[in-house]
């Protein structure tokens, strides 16, 4: 008996040891999600990856900083808006941007930096992966062109804000590649131009209704011109693309093509640009979509939602109103803009006056009595579900056709007078001579509070920027607070660039140089 | 309850009468004495084995028992003495000497895959036995270790029923999950809240790495081995235990009353440049004490437990049924924990060489809870911040005519009588009427769990045993919540759609272990060799659904199908995961005469949580001990009769991170709207890191065990150094990588400390007493963090941001904020507080504002000046327990204490206007010389007085009388007549007294995570409980 037992026991033990030692037993790939190493295979996968890249366009936050929309932040930097918020502590980081007294640890600065590299990473990744995806060349080339546009867009935001940044056209493969150095700004701009011209050559001219939100070649042309004006203004240089020089005339050529052939035109009603009726309309050359199709609740992952956070931030702090709902009064509009616009008919569509508000108004920090009307917590853009702060539905019109007309005029189009007249007559203004100053000034009137002003000023040079951005003694009739909180002095030692975020500099162990003035 | 009790008693009584109806035969008389002192012992239970026939000794130790048919063996048992069984062998007179059961070192400890006599144990193992647990019944198994085990710090997370205690063995070992590994009857389980504490026979805590190494890659935070009760040979015992308790708040904070509140609000407004909100002549209509409103009076707690155990030479069993229910002192049945367990453990001797057994438990847990420590939606934090001018119930027609009531008439929250809860039109944000907030709490978790194993053991040859054990841990977890319509204030409302959320998850872990153990003694050389394998797999799957427009009157019975929504906003989700472990291990123990002992362990573990590069790891350990007192060369040590030295070294791992963290998984939470449709996007969630491995902890332990005065005094002293390396964290990577960082092994932490536990027990002429003390002193230091900041940000508080963090050279999770240096008394103070360059350091400050310290001396007060302002982790924790037994009375107490740490008192929302405060606010600065610690009260805090600073930090030291108990055992001579073996009744009080200078509601604040510790956001305080209980054994 015992002998049998012994055998039995030993047998059992050995059998078990062998069976359990199977290698597969510990190999447990995820069950409910795909691993990146075996994802990129089909057209559908490529589309998902593309959507994830577009997704970053709508990001207005980054891990650790929930609220940093490009629109609000660039306007706060400019002379069009103050920091605002409920109190100085609420808008501390915004206030630092507003007063050009920006510590290198400013969280919004870091959020912007992280956002753009997130987009660049996703664009680079998809361009690397698409090679092995089974799809038609036509399908692939359009996706690559969109990736190039998006990469260019993110690099433009990045280089205009930070100037000295690493230029990555491939993803980082592991810790050994973490350390990078800053590229010369010209290299970044040339990369942007190269990507955009590639995109212009491939992207479709017409976007069907069921693809509204995807990019057209005209969007790329518009972005190229915007990039050129800034680069040429700041550095006095032209692009070099594939060893060819891309100068005023080349860029203008793309714009003229658009003006003539794209079908883009001005809305009859200026204000359509900021209403649902005008979304992806004829005037919209490049537009970022926002919405509440999936009502968003998650305060811990704000950028998972599609709401326009700028609209929430800039809305007045009103409760019990039929027309505006519980904004946070960031980016309160500078009295200077109201004064500069004077009797311009566009003022009423640009600035929301305190007197227009019904309901109970709570006046926050740097209360001027003026708010942005273009992107606000107005009733039309309220969400139907979800956490209301996270679901404002207004699309961000990044490049409008009126901007294209003004850029073409500024670049010396023979039709400059016509272009300027078109922009002005649309709002019932009479013609003025198409001088450089008039064209430039028209941009302020036409495009204020749309995230354009800051870079328009910076590209005119530091003495102009100091003159424009330094604003002392202005606060309007409805202000709350001491004059000192409305007094802003531009710091031209920074050349208008933000600091490279401190933790980025720290992690590079010396390969990064901080921007001048910080 | 009492009605049910009587029913049970009656039924049992009848059964016992019938069963004991048997013929009387022979009578045995005799006397029982103490074997050492020779004193007679009264009250010794004398039992005829295998029957219910028994008696007890009288005051002179004499007994007389008429033997019934059956066994001729008598069993003599008395608390504090070793139980003695003696065959009568036909004798009519038997005199017995009982041996005092003092020799703790003869106890058997569980060491994982076996047991060992404490005498020869080489590692640091603390034991809590059934007697300690049954004497002071705890609500949850984990609490049984509180105050009883040196080196094991048990802190209740909050006073909410069912909130698990935080258990830390030898300090916080990681910035990740530092919970110990729980092993119940050999089965690794995910938590122990399912256990009925009454089912526990013994808890053994493997504290040092050498002992824990037998659990290898999962043991770095210590191992808690729990053995449930099994039957013993002899008569069948039925034990019924029950208690009923009432719970009340132990402390209420002194809040501003209405007059003080109005005065302070006026002052805050005035100082902030706002219009004063209250006319100074206003007489308040209400003066609501919100704490009175929310605290439930005499919240009930009840427990029933029936255990039947027994057996014979072939089979033994122990089976139990228990019910426990506890309602909270806040919210009553909105904050309730219920547990039902059923258990069967059996052991069957199939043949001489084959044993078969099982341990099976079913448990059902039902938990309803509210946020127990939250700045934003906590009921208690709302009560501490809500204005006293608001009535709990608003009945004033003028008030009810105001727009906030009228416009939201359909969404107002009403009490059970249909009356409307008051809505404040002043206090903003998340601070709402706490009674109304309670009314809309609906979250409920139900867990059904089956845990158990079945094993067979074969003796192949003498001393060589093969054991195979197959266990499962199966859990179904249901969670429901319902979101009714409500309007609490302009920000806290749901006026769109009601909604219901449901989820169900299933977790199954199986574990198959095979061990071969050979035990042999050759002369005085005793050794055993264990080899084994363990394979285990966990599968989890969950489903959840959400639906809108679900009208109901009963939030406890809401289902997805009840939706009336034509918009079809239903959502569904679900996922799954799996994990697996495979391990092989070996252990050699050796001792010579018990004098020299050696233990060596090696375990090789494979864990699916890591990539192919680092899937397997080896975990060795060595331990030696030397029983010095047995050496002939040792000089006489006087009173010391036992002295053992121990030393051990070992390496353990911790793999408590989520599955697949080495991989880069696709994240589908991306989206963009194209063509009016929200398209789903996908991109990698984070960069992959194939090289991650478990956290590795290396520990040295040096110790001695001592017995003196014939083992009346027993002491154990341990010194340890524990270094944990390769902490798994996501530390920032450069932004230009463009994706979130992967886990990486990036940090090191060191815990070192000493532990002392000592007990003195004595018996003098019927008076038996003991007093025990255990204390642990632990120093925790983060020794390395592999990022450039050399720090990791921790938990946040309120809207103010991070309040804890880890940094090299400092303890894990220290409080991080600004250091203050008094209050500016006048403008001259402000003007003379200068930076090195002569500029004002605080240009925005006014008199009454806080003076912050420019720590880095750069001339500005900013984020860079934040520094260590406190440490939430105690350096020293202790427990003191004592007991006295005299005649039939017994008395015991347990005190716990923690010292050397601070608490962040953040229950007040100073960032909001109109919130109420404790009366501490009255000590604010009001003019030069009025206060140098409490700043001016102002609504416009330009100087940021309210930022996180040492002004929030308080000394957290406390000593708490955790339990005090008085019991009475019904005299055996009375009991024997009604065939009851043992009947004890007791009254006890928990948390009767707390000595602390902490001004918040409760200084015992457990960790919600390694970083979220010691932050009082208005914590749900622990109740003061009075219990009446009884234990009857038939």
Image: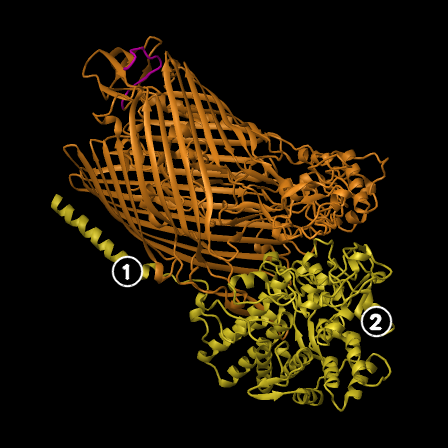
Chain colours: A yellow, B orange
Examine the structure image and report whether residue B36 is included in the region drawn in magenta.
yes
Q: Quadrant of the C terminus of chain B?
A: top left
Which percent across, then down, holds residue B1005?
Answer: 54, 39
Q: Which mark is residue A22?
A: 1
Residue underneath mark 2 = A340
Confirm whether residue B438 shows in the render: no
- Relative height, residue A408 to residue B41 (above, below): below
Mark 1–mark 2 Cα distance, whole angstroms, equals 77 Å
Examine the structure image and report whether residue B130 is included in the region drawn in magenta.
no
Nearer to me, B380 or B310: B380
Which percent across, then down, holds residue B668?
Answer: 52, 66
* Residues in magenta, as a range: B35-49
- Specify whether A396 is left or right of B305: right
Task: Tell me the residue at 40%/48% (across/down).
Answer: B724
Mark whose residue sits in front, 1 or 2 = 2
Q: Residues within 10 Å of mark 2 (few under 14, many from 20)?
A: few
Mark 2 secondary-structure assignment:
helix
Q: Quadrant of residue B609?
A: bottom left
Nearer to me, A274 or A87: A87
- Relative height, residue A72 to residue B35 (above, below): below
Q: Main secondary structure of the magenta part?
A: loop
Nearer to me, B743 or B444: B743
Which percent across, then down, holds residue B612?
Answer: 35, 62
- Specify whether B90 is left or right of A320: left
């Amino acid at each position: 008996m015992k002998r049998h037992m012994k055998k039995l026991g030993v047998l059992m033990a050995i059998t078990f040891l062998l069976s359990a030692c199977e290698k597969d037993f510990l190999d447990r790939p995820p069950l409910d999600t795909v691993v990146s190493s075996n994802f990129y295979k089909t057209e559908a996968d490529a589309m998902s990856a593309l959507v994830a890249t577009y997704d970053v366009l709508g990001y207005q936050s980054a891990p650790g900083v929930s609220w940093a929309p490009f629109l609000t932040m660039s306007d706060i930097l400019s002379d069009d808006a103050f920091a605002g918020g409920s109190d100085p502590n609420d808008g501390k980081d915004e206030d630092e941007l507003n007063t050009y007294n920006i510590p290198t640890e400013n969280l919004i600065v870091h959020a912007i930096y992280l956002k753009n590299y997130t987009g660049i990473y996703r664009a680079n990744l998809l361009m690397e992966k698409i090679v092995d995806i089974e799809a038609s060349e036509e399908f692939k080339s359009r996706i690559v062109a969109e990736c190039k546009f998006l990469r260019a867009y993110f690099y433009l935001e990045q280089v205009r804000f930070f100037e000295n940044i690493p230029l990555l056209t491939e993803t980082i493969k592991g810790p050994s590649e973490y350390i990078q150095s800053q590229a010369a700004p010209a290299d970044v701009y040339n990369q942007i131009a190269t990507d955009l011209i590639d995109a212009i050559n491939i992207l479709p001219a017409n976007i069907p209704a069921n693809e509204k939100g995807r990019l057209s070649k005209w969007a790329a042309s518009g972005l190229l011109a915007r990039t050129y004006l800034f680069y040429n203004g700041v550095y006095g240089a032209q692009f070099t693309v594939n060893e060819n020089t891309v100068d005023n005339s080349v860029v203008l050529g793309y714009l003229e093509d658009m003006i003539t052939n794209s079908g883009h035109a001005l809305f009859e009603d200026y204000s359509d640009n900021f209403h649902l009726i005008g979304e992806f309309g004829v005037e919209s050359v490049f537009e970022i979509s926002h919405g509440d199709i999936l009502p968003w609740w998650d305060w811990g992952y704000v950028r998972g939602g599609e709401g326009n956070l700028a609209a929430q931030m800039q809305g007045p702090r009103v409760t019990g109103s039929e027309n505006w709902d519980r904004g946070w009064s960031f980016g309160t509009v500078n009295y200077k803009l109201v004064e500069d616009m004077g009797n311009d008919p566009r003022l009423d569509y640009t600035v929301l006056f305190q007197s227009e508000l019904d309901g109970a108004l709570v006046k926050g920090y740097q209360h001027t009595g003026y708010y942005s009307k273009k992107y606000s917590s107005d009733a039309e853009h309220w969400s139907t579900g979800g956490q209301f702060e996270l679901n404002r539905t207004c699309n961000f019109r990044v490049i409008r056709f009126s901007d294209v007309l003004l850029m073409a005029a500024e670049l010396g189009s023979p039709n400059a007078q016509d272009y300027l007249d078109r922009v002005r007559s649309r709002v019932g203004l009479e013609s003025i001579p198409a001088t450089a100053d008039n064209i430039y000034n028209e941009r302020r009137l036409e495009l204020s509070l749309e995230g354009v002003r800051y870079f328009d000023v910076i590209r005119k040079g530091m003495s102009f920027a100091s003159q424009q951005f330094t604003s002392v003694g202005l606060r309007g009739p409805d202000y709350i607070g001491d004059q000192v909180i409305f007094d802003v002095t531009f710091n031209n030692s920074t050349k208008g660039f933000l600091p490279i975020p401190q933790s980025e500099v720290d992690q590079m162990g010396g390969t990064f140089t901080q921007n001048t003035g910080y | 309850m009492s009605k049910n009790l009587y029913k049970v008693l009656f039924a049992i009584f009848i059964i016992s009468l019938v069963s004991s109806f048997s013929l009387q035969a022979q009578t045995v008389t005799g006397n029982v004495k103490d074997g050492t002192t020779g004193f007679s012992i009264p009250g010794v239970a004398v039992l005829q084995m295998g029957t219910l026939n028994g008696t007890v000794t009288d005051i002179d130790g004499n007994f007389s028992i008429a033997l019934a048919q059956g066994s001729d063996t008598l069993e003599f048992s008395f608390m504090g003495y070793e139980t003695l069984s003696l065959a009568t062998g036909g004798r009519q007179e038997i005199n017995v000497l009982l041996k005092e059961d003092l020799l703790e070192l003869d106890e058997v400890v569980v060491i994982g895959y076996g047991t060992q006599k404490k005498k020869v144990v080489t590692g640091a193992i603390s034991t809590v036995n059934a007697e300690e647990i049954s004497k002071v019944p705890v609500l949850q198994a984990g609490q049984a270790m509180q105050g009883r085990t040196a080196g094991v710090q048990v802190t209740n997370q909050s006073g909410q029923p069912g909130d698990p205690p935080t258990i830390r063995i030898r300090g916080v070992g990681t910035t990740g999950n530092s919970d110990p590994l729980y092993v119940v009857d050999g089965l690794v389980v995910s938590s122990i809240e399912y256990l009925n504490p009454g089912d526990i026979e013994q808890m053994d805590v493997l504290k040092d790495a050498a002992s824990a190494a037998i659990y290898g890659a999962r043991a770095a935070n210590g191992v808690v081995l729990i053995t449930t009760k099994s039957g013993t040979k002899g008569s069948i015992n039925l034990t019924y235990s029950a208690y009923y308790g009432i719970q009340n708040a132990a402390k209420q904070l002194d809040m501003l009353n209405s007059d003080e509140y109005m005065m302070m609000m006026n002052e805050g407004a005035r100082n902030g440049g706002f219009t004063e909100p209250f006319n100074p002549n206003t007489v308040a209509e209400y003066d609501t004490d919100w704490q009175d409103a929310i605290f439930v009076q005499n919240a009930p707690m009840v427990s029933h437990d029936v255990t039947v155990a027994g057996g014979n030479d072939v089979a033994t069993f122990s089976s139990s049924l228990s019910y426990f229910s506890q309602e909270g002192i806040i919210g009553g049945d909105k904050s309730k924990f219920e547990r039902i367990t059923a258990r069967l453990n059996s052991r069957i001797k199939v043949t001489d060489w084959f044993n078969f057994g099982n341990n099976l438990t079913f448990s059902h847990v039902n938990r309803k809870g509210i946020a127990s420590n939250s700045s934003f939606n906590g009921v208690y934090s709302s009560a501490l911040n809500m204005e006293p001018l608001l009535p709990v119930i608003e009945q004033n027609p003028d008030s009810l005519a105001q727009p906030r009531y009228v416009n939201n008439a359909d969404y107002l929250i009403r009490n059970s009588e249909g009356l409307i809860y008051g809505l404040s039109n002043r206090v903003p944000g998340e601070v709402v009427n706490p009674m109304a907030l309670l009314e809309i709490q609906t979250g409920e978790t139900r867990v059904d769990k089956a845990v158990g194993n079945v094993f067979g053991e074969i003796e192949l040859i003498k001393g060589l045993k093969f054991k195979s054990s197959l266990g499962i841990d199966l859990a179904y977890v249901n969670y429901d919540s319902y979101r009714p319509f409500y309007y609490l204030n302009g920000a806290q409302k749901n006026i769109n759609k009601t909604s219901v959320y449901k989820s169900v998850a299933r977790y199954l872990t199986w574990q198959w272990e095979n061990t071969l153990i050979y035990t042999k003694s050759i002369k005085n050389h005793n050794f055993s060799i264990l080899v084994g394998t363990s394979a285990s797999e966990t599968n989890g799957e969950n489903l959840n659904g959400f639906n809108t427009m679900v009208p109901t009157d009963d939030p406890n019975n809401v289902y997805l199908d009840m939706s009336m929504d034509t918009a079809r906003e239903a959502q569904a989700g679900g996922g799954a995961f799996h994990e697996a472990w495979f391990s092989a291990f070996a252990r050699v123990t050796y001792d010579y005469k018990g004098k020299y002992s050696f233990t060596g362990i090696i375990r090789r573990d494979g864990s699916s949580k890591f990539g192919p590069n680092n899937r397997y790891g080896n975990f060795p350990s060595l331990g030696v001990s030397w029983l010095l007192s047995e050496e002939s060369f040792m000089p006489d040590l006087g009173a010391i009769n036992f002295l053992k030295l121990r030393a051990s070294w070992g390496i353990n791992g911790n793999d408590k991170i989520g599955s697949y963290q080495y991989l880069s998984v696709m994240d589908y939470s991306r989206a963009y709207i194209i063509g009016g449709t929200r398209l789903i996007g996908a991109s990698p969630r984070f960069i992959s890191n194939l090289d991650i491995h478990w956290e590795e902890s290396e520990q040295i332990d040096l110790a001695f065990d001592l017995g003196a005065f014939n083992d009346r005094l027993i002491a154990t002293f341990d010194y340890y150094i524990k270094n944990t390396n390769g902490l798994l964290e996501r530390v920032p990577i450069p932004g230009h990588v463009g994706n979130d960082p992967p886990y990486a092994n990036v940090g090191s932490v060191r815990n070192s400390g000493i532990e002392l536990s000592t007990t003195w027990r004595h018996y003098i002429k019927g008076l038996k007493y003991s007093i025990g003390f255990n204390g642990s002193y632990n120093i925790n230091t983060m020794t390395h963090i592999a990022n450039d900041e050399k720090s990791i940000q921790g938990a946040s508080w309120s809207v103010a941001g991070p309040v804890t963090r880890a940094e090299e050279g400092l303890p894990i999770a220290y409080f991080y904020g600004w250091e203050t240096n008094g209050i500016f008394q006048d403008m001259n103070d402000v003007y003379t507080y200068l930076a090195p360059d002569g500029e004002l350091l605080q240009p925005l400050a006014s008199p009454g504002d806080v003076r912050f310290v420019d720590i880095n001396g750069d001339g500005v007060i900013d984020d860079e000046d934040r520094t260590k302002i406190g440490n939430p982790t105690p350096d020293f924790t202790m427990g003191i327990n004592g007991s006295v037994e005299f005649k039939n009375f017994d008395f015991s107490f347990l005190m716990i204490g923690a010292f050397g740490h601070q608490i962040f008192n953040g229950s007040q929302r100073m960032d909001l206007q109109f919130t109420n405060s404790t009366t501490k606010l009255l000590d604010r600065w009001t003019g030069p010389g009025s206060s140098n610690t409490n700043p001016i009260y102002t609504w416009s805090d330009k100087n940021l007085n309210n930022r996180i600073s040492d002004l929030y930090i308080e000394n957290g030291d406390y000593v708490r009388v955790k339990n005090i108990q008085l019991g009475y055992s019904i005299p055996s001579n009375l009991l024997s007549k009604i065939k009851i073996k043992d009947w004890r009744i007791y009254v006890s009080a928990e948390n009767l007294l707390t000595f602390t200078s902490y001004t918040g509601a409760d200084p015992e604040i457990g960790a919600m995570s390694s970083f979220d510790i010691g932050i009082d956001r208005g914590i749900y305080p622990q109740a003061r409980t009075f219990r009446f209980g009884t234990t009857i054994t038939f």
